[in-house]
Every structure is written in C-alpha cells, then in structure tokens.
Image: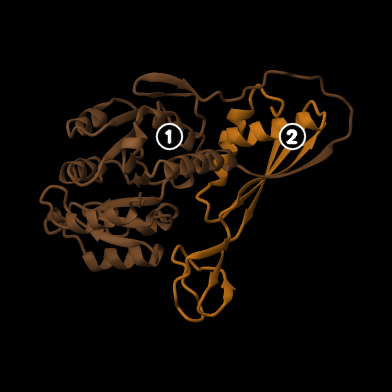
Amino acid sequence: MCDTCGCGIVDSYAVDGVPTSSGAPTDSEHSHDGDQDHRHVHIHASLLGKNDRIAERNRGHLMEKGVAAINMVSSPGAGKTALIERTLRDAVDTMKAGVIVGDLATDNDAKRLSATQAPVVQITTGTVCHLDADMVAHAMPRLDLDALDLLIIENVGNLVCPAGYDLGEDARVVLMSVTEGEDKPAKYPTMFRTADVVVITKVDMAEPARFDREAALNCIHRVAPDAAVIELSAVTGEGMEAWHEYLAQRLHRR
Amino acid sequence: MQEAVGIAGHHAREAGATRIRMIRVRIGESSGVVREALEFAFEAVTEGTMAEGAALDIEVTPTICHCAGCASEFKPANVFRECPSCGSLSTDIVQGMELELTSLEVT
C-alpha cells in the first residue's frame, strides 16, 4: 500500500484540471545535536487516521444528502469505465448517478462518461496511484449532490494501494475480468478482502479466454467469504440485471 | 509514511524536542505493507525534516483470525483464512491489519 511504497506522497492533484494542494507538511527546521538524553514519546496513532476521519466526514455528508456511494476498484483495463458507462445509460430513467473518476493523467474517462449526460468530475492524481478521502472531499462539491441518488467513484486502476484508503463509500466494488486469471483474489488478497461485491467482467469473453469459472468463484469465496459475486458483460448486457438490482438495494430511501 | 513523519513531528514538537532519533511503527502482516518499501520511503520523506537520520523500528504483528464456528482464534496458514479445526473461512481479522505509529525517541 502507498503509505509504504512511497507513492503515498501526495504533492498535488487536480480536480477537473484545477490544481489542488494537499498542504503536505514540510519541516525545514534543523537544530544542532545536543547532548540531551533521548526521551521516549508514546503515540499510538493510526497512520491512516487522517484519511479515515475525512472518509467518515464524506460518508456523513453523503448520507445527509441521501446519496449512496460506491468505490469501484480493479486493475487497469478490467472494465470499470465500460461498466459505469453502461450503468449510466441503462439507468438514465430510474436513478440519478454522478461520477468521480480518478486517473493519473488525462480526462479521457471523464469525457467518455460525460457522453452519457451524467455529471462527471475528473481527479488527476499526478503520480499518486490511488484516490484518498481528501481528493474525494474536494471533488464532491462540484456535483449537485441534492440531485443525485448514487455517487460512483471510479478509483485509479490499481489493486494494491487503493485497498487502504476508505473514501467514505457505502460499498466497495472490486472488479476482475475473465482475462486476468482465476487466482487474482489470491494474488491481491488485501484488496479483495475489502470487497462488498466482486464483479467478474467481460464474461462474453470467458470462452476464448478459457476462463475457469468454478476456480474463480472458489478463489473469490475463499478470500472474501462475505462478498456478493456478480458476473456480467457491459458489452452484451449479460448479467447487468443483477448488477442493477444490487445498486437499487444500495440506494438510500429518501 | 509521510503521514507518519508528520504525526511524529507534531508529537515531538509538543514534547519540546528538536530532533527525532527513532520512530517506532507497528504494521500488521495482512495490512499489505511491505517492510522494505516502508524503509525506502522513510529515508525519502524524512529528508530535510527533524526526523532526518532517525532510525526506523518496524514491529510486524502476525495475523490472527477469529473463527465464529469454534469461537477460537487461529493463525491462518496462507491468504485464505481457513480455520484449522473446522475448515470454515473467517472474515474476522482480530490482529494483523495494524498501521500504527507507536512511539518516538527524541532529543
């Protein structure tokens, strides 16, 4: 995870192209080495405490607005954007959804999703390989939350670092496509373990990919026993009904 | 890691210290954190701060799961948290997800 791989060093990121500073503390004061004895200072503070606090604030704010939020994570290319695109098109008459999409660079995904007429905010993280709660907090005011039922947060394509960062979502959706290998959950257990639902994408390609469905389901179940599993194809529409049903259940009653 | 150094600096200053000599952290075996990466990042983020040159002490806590079926705790053999007694899968990690700054040595 990032606090560790050094990619947690958030210098700056942009929300819809507007640079935002994380206000990372720097310390340039240097003192001379004294001869004082070492003193012990007890702390016991969670390193993700700050993110968790902001995430909790996001969650409260969304709840107050009656907006359900999902955090969609996967490796790059698993089909997050395609699924969101299809979801927005299918549900245009039944639910109002907005999207916050994170990428290291470009607003390609925001453009692609904006074509559905849904409100979309792009966060470009620069070098950071995950979204954090603060980025989402800065992006949320750009959406008219009063008009939304659902906030879809498309995280940066990465199965490692986003695992540790609560964004304030109600549910975490972890995607894996049939071309990625059945044992993906065993390779990235930290992420899959946090899944409320695992979505197997691109099932229309299962046969040419020689996807072993039973092995995949078994692997998902062993890593994330409580997670629901939905199998779908955003291209053919197969399985989309179950996905929409799942989303409908997540929506807050107003 | 930057967050760790930030919190450490805050506490050290509050204690009236001018330098941080050691930072102790506790990371869970299942937290997804890699010791080597942490050490590498530590050097980078302490540069130019009051923690520059400080030692980093990493305590790794093993993963312990709770089995609801047996009402007992066990150490999983691998990423699948299968109870060795009854074979059911645990969703309850009671230890091993820590990511904590525990203490400092300051002067």
The colouring scheme, among rainbow, by chain, secondary structure or one colour, is by chain
Residue A39, quarter of the rendered image = top right
Q: Nearer the viewer, residue A9 or A243?
A: A243
In the picture as drawn, the residue positioned furthest to the front comes out as A254
A131 shown above or below B77: above
**Secondary structure type for disc 2:** helix
Q: Which mark is drawn over residue B11? A: 2
Q: Mark 1 is on which residue type?
A: Val
Q: Position of residue A13 (x, y in %)?
A: 43, 25
Q: Nearer the viewer, residue B85 or A134?
A: A134
Q: Mark 2 is on which residue type?
A: His
A210 shown above or below A7: below
Q: Which chain is orange?
A: B
Kindly tell me whether residue A54 is visible in this rendering: yes
State the residue at coordinates (50%, 50%): B32
Q: Which mark is drawn over residue A136? A: 1
- The picture's colour for chain A is brown
Chain designation of label 1: A
The Cα–Cα distance between marks 2 and 1, rounded to whole angstroms, is: 28 Å
**Secondary structure type for disc 1:** helix
Residue A231, quarter of the rendered image = bottom left
Q: Position of residue A14 (x, y in %)?
A: 40, 23
State the residue at coordinates (34%, 63%): A220
